[in-house]
Image (cartoon, rainbow, N blue to C red):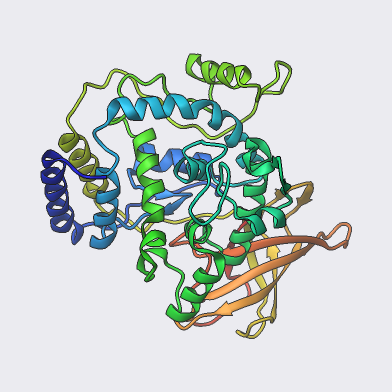
Amino acid sequence: MTLSPTSTSSLTLILLLLFVSASAQKITSGKNKPFHQAAYQSRVSAGLNRLHFCGETVPTEQGDVSAKLAFALASNAGYARHINSLKNRSAPYFAIVEPILQKHSIPSDFKYLPLIESDWHANAISSAGAVGYWQFMDETAQDMGLSITPGHDERTDLRKSTEAACTYLKFLYRKLGSWTLVAAAYNGGVGMIQRKITKSGQRDYYTMAMNTETGHYLYRILAMKELFTNPSYGIGSVGIMLASAGNAYEKEREQARQMGWLQEDEPEPEGIPVESFYGNPVRKESVVVDSLLTELLKSKPRKPMVYVGDVATKLVKAGPLKVGKSWAFTLTEDVQIGEDALKIGDILYAVVDDVDARGNLFLRATKAIPAETKKPISLTLLAMNPSTGMAGLIPPKKIEPGWIVQWKL
């Protein structure tokens, strides 16, 4: 896209603002309940005013991060009619995609992937040969259970390809332990991301040296998310209310029915909301983008943010700090994992997946043993750093029984 003179001057102003403000920016605080994506996103958006992807804070205080975000926003901003049209066109697709993501416990931010991958075109084909809404290559599509026989390519089926995408996203998350890295791996491949982790000794997308496309991929998602959800955009839109009652939601449900994707007797899906905005005055691109990034950077530090996982445990027995060694924990609260109900005192067993060059400990829980039945339950949980919300713990200097560890499903 070629920026107009107005856009270019706006972008220059943005970058000056970003680099002047970046040194003063620190992470804001918040206290959240056990990690649930929808509630957490709502709290951050409403109370803490920090940009995030799938609950992982975007470090806009870093100059290169804010610059890439500025370029992504400037490349898409200033087209109110286009954004409104895109919202309206996306609504029936979101009505199908979002409940499927929720069913598989995939954060709702991933609903923007098919939008940036295929622009909602079922028959989209990339130069590399990827096909469909989610742009699957032949081999990956078949691995995820999709049929790609001549005349019957399920990559062009919205429901089936979204189910396959969820399977693939969960596979990537089990490998990488961070939704941000999952998004990067969706674009660049899990092998590439794992090599970057091994080479750099850390798992931070924002500081990893990526190829140009993968290095900007997440920012394209973040820019689209801002355009859809920030009150500065979408003037006059019918809005998107995918998880709440109201006229806008009913309109998109009706659109989905007309397109043959929903049946009259189909149960009401539960998704994660994308806000709808009304009554905002039209503003020029420079004002919209500048004010948005000012808001991203102006929040003042209070105290470090604390992330709470899906499952809380305390250490019973620590194993050696070596890959493959077993550790034992006991649950400190009742929790429902799928069809299995676990209670306080049940035992959770984990293995060491990695101890990186910085001393971060990567633990993966593999099974739980309820005190009542003594019957092992297979599961997969990743130990979570409470200061970042990502996999990889910083262990205490002296690891002792009673150490509290949070886990993500």
Classify residue 402 as left or right of residue 372: left
Of 25 and 77, the residue lying toward us: 77
Q: Position of residue 3 (x, y in %)?
A: 19, 43
The total of numbered circles placed on residues is: 0
Of 334 and 175, the residue lying toward us: 175
Of 220 and 389, the residue lying toward us: 220
Classify residue 152 as left or right of residue 125: right
Whether residue 340 is visible: yes
Q: Position of residue 142 (x, y in %)?
A: 71, 54
Q: Position of residue 147 (x, y in %)?
A: 73, 47
Q: Quadrant of the N terminus?
A: top left
Classify residue 300 as left or right of residue 330: left
Classify residue 283 as left or right of residue 45: left
Q: Position of residue 217 (x, y in %)?
A: 40, 55
**From the viewer's perspective, is residue 210 above or below residue 46?**
below
**From the viewer's perspective, is residue 26 above or below residue 365?**
above
Q: Quadrant of residue 150?
A: top right
- Residue drawn at x 60%, y 55% is 137
Q: Quadrant of residue 366?
A: bottom right
- Residue drawn at x 16%, y 58% is 19
Of 267 and 61, the residue lying toward us: 267
Whether residue 57 is visible: no
Q: Quadrant of the C terminus?
A: bottom right
- Residue drawn at x 36%, y 57% is 216
